[in-house]
Image (cartoon, grey):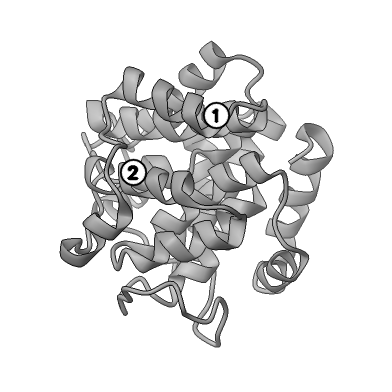
């Protein structure tokens, strides 16, 4: 799942400094991990330990309080009674990549994706976004072609994936909803010819760059099989020892 995390780190510099081009530096002094990475690592750790998603998410996020969480998530994090808040934000989709890599069947992936979403994002669109991303990753990791992935995601989740980024990009703005950012991230993957191009395309939309690159990056890693070594190294250098340890153990168990 390093592909998702690298997307977050690369996109972080452009989250609030939108660009509409693919010709940008991948890393700079402003590149860092955000809440996308923290939440993704938390779900991975939960899968590795067979632990409760909500408990592990809470524990990890409390250890990284300055990662840039959304307002509603912060309220959830620091409330005495952590209940879901009917969100359809893309937070459910940004953290779900470990499920797509770890699940053994489509049914298991969809169930785990729902379970990982509903602890906060129990709105139907929040669940849908997580399931769509997890299924795309699962299919890509198991050798499905782009046409099959596109068809399945459209059939099950009714996202419009027939649009082109060149048509979307000019009027596209910052959108943190699942329904307004997940389809566009998937389209970035579908139009790409490599992992790096996928990340550049996701960032070039000028939207919620770190999350869209995180979503697209997870699918791209699963499809292309790996990410460039220099990107992996630059990403690892920006993570904590705890995060690197989780990633290493996840790869050892699941192969990603």
Look at the numbered disc 1 and give the secondary structure of its residue.
loop
**Picture residue at 61% right of the left edge, 14% below the top:** 105
Q: Which of marks 2 and 1 is in front?
A: 2
Among the 4 quarters of the image, the one containing residue 92:
top left
The residue at the far bottom in this view is 29
Provide the residue designation for mark 1. 52
122 is higher (above) or lower (below) than 61: above
Q: Report the number of numbered marks.
A: 2
Residue at the far left: name it.
171
| Residue 181 left/right relative to 112 | left
Disc 2: CA contacts within 10 A as few (<14), some (14-19) or many (>=20): many
Look at the numbered disc 2 and give the secondary structure of its residue.
helix
Q: Name the residue located 19 percent from the left edge and 63 percent from the top edge.
A: 173
Front residue of 167 and 189: 167
Decide which of 224, 231 is in the foreground and name it: 224
Q: Residue at x 38, y 45 (%)?
A: 187
- Image coordinates of residue 160 in percent, x first then y, are 25, 34
Q: Picture coordinates of residue 230 (x, y %)?
A: 74, 71
């Amino acid at each position: 799942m390093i592909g998702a995390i690298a997307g977050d780190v690369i996109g972080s510099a452009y989250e609030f400094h939108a660009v509409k081009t693919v010709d940008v530096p991948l890393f700079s002094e402003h590149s860092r991990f955000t809440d996308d990475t923290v939440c993704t690592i938390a779900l991975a750790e939960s899968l590795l330990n067979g632990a409760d998603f909500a408990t592990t998410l809470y524990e990890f996020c409390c250890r990284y309080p300055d990662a840039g969480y959304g307002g509603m998530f912060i309220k959830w994090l620091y409330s005495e009674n952590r209940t879901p808040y009917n969100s359809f934000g893309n937070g459910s989709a940004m953290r779900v990549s470990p499920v797509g890599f770890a699940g053994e069947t489509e049914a298991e992936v969809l169930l785990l994706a729902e379970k990982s979403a509903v602890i906060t994002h129990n709105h139907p669109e929040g669940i849908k976004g997580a399931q769509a991303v997890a299924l795309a990753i699962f299919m890509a990791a198991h050798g499905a072609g782009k046409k099959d992935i596109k068809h399945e995601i459209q059939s099950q989740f009714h996202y419009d994936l027939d649009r082109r980024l060149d048509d979307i990009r000019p009027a596209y703005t910052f959108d943190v909803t699942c329904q307004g950012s997940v389809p566009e991230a998937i389209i970035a993957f579908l139009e790409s010819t490599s992992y790096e191009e996928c990340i550049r395309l996701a960032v070039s939309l000028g939207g919620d760059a770190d999350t869209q690159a995180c979503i697209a990056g997870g699918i791209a890693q699963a499809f292309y099989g790996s990410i460039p070594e220099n990107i992996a190294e630059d990403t690892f250098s920006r993570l904590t020892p705890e995060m690197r340890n989780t990633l290493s153990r996840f790869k050892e168990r699941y192969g990603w």
